[in-house]
Image (spheres, rainbow, N blue to C red):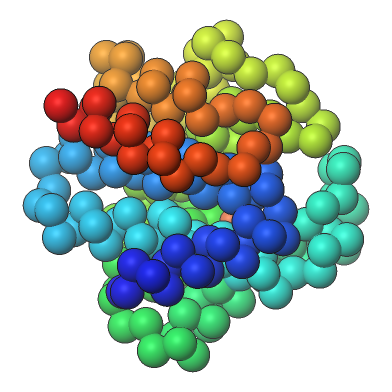
Amino acid sequence: MDPEIVEALVGVLEAKDLCTAAHSWRVILYARAMAEAAGLDHAMILRITYGAALHDVGKIDVPDEIILKPGPLTDAEFTVMKTHAALGHERLVRMGETDDVVLSLVRHHHERWDGKGYPDQLSGVDIPIAPRMFAVIDSFDAMTSVRPYRTDIGPDAAKRAIDELAAGAGTRYATDAVTLFTALFSRGGLNWILEYFNDTCPVPDYSELAALEKIRGG
Ligand SMILES: [Fe+2]
């Protein structure tokens, strides 16, 4: 996928909702760290990075009053919110995207290991590996980032999030994905993302991102 198109789509999301945009930037970095830790080659790491960047692109098509609601959603609103996974996939297909890693990550990032997720209720290894791994990242960030209704973040929240992931291994999440993410977290390999990219829904600073990537890459 053309990096400029990825950036443009993430830009549209930023314009709509800065919390979603900040979340997108963090999960890109978590996904990259996890893909590197899994020993994947550069081309695959790039494909996963693009998929991570675009995972919530379907939120462009969800009404603002639901995306920006400063509190828990009603059941009816949540039903609409859940359409973002399939809508994002459909949008990318319409744009001519054919990369199965990108498409599967966007469509299936809310599937669950036990088949109780959405949009297709896939279960176990029927869930492609990229969204299986990404579901852990997405949940971790949701549990450790500032949201309109929660400001409880930091190392304690991260520890609790890791415990939640462990509790959900084999039901909500793929056990191998939880194991890999937890190992990386335990080694301190994710602290730079947790610490540097997590505040009150900021405008992402591209120069800071580049600088941190450089520091990290050596
Ligand atoms: Fe999502």
Q: Quadrant of the N terminus?
A: bottom left
Image side of residue 22 versus residue 72, left or right? left
The structure residue drawn at horizontal position 33% and vertical position 30%, both measured from the top left corner, is: 212
Does residue 169 appear anywhere in the picture?
Answer: no
Return the x and y of residue 198 as percentages of the image width and height: 57, 28
Return the x and y of residue 59 as percentages of the image width and height: 66, 65
Q: Residue furthest front?
A: 207
Q: Is residue 11 above or below residue 190?
A: below
Q: Quadrant of residue 119?
A: bottom right
Q: Quadrant of the C terminus?
A: top left
Image side of residue 77 versus residue 175, left or right? right
The structure residue drawn at horizontal position 57% and vertical position 9%, both measured from the top left corner, is: 156
Which of 143 and 147 lies nearest the eye of the viewer?
147
Which of 201 and 189 lies nearest the eye of the viewer?
201
Quadrant for ligand 1 reads bottom right
Return the x and y of residue 115 as percentages of the image width and height: 51, 57
Which of 203 and 132 lies nearest the eye of the viewer?
203
Q: Residue furthest top?
A: 156
Does residue 198 appear anywhere in the picture?
Answer: yes
Q: Is residue 195 above or below residue 117?
A: above
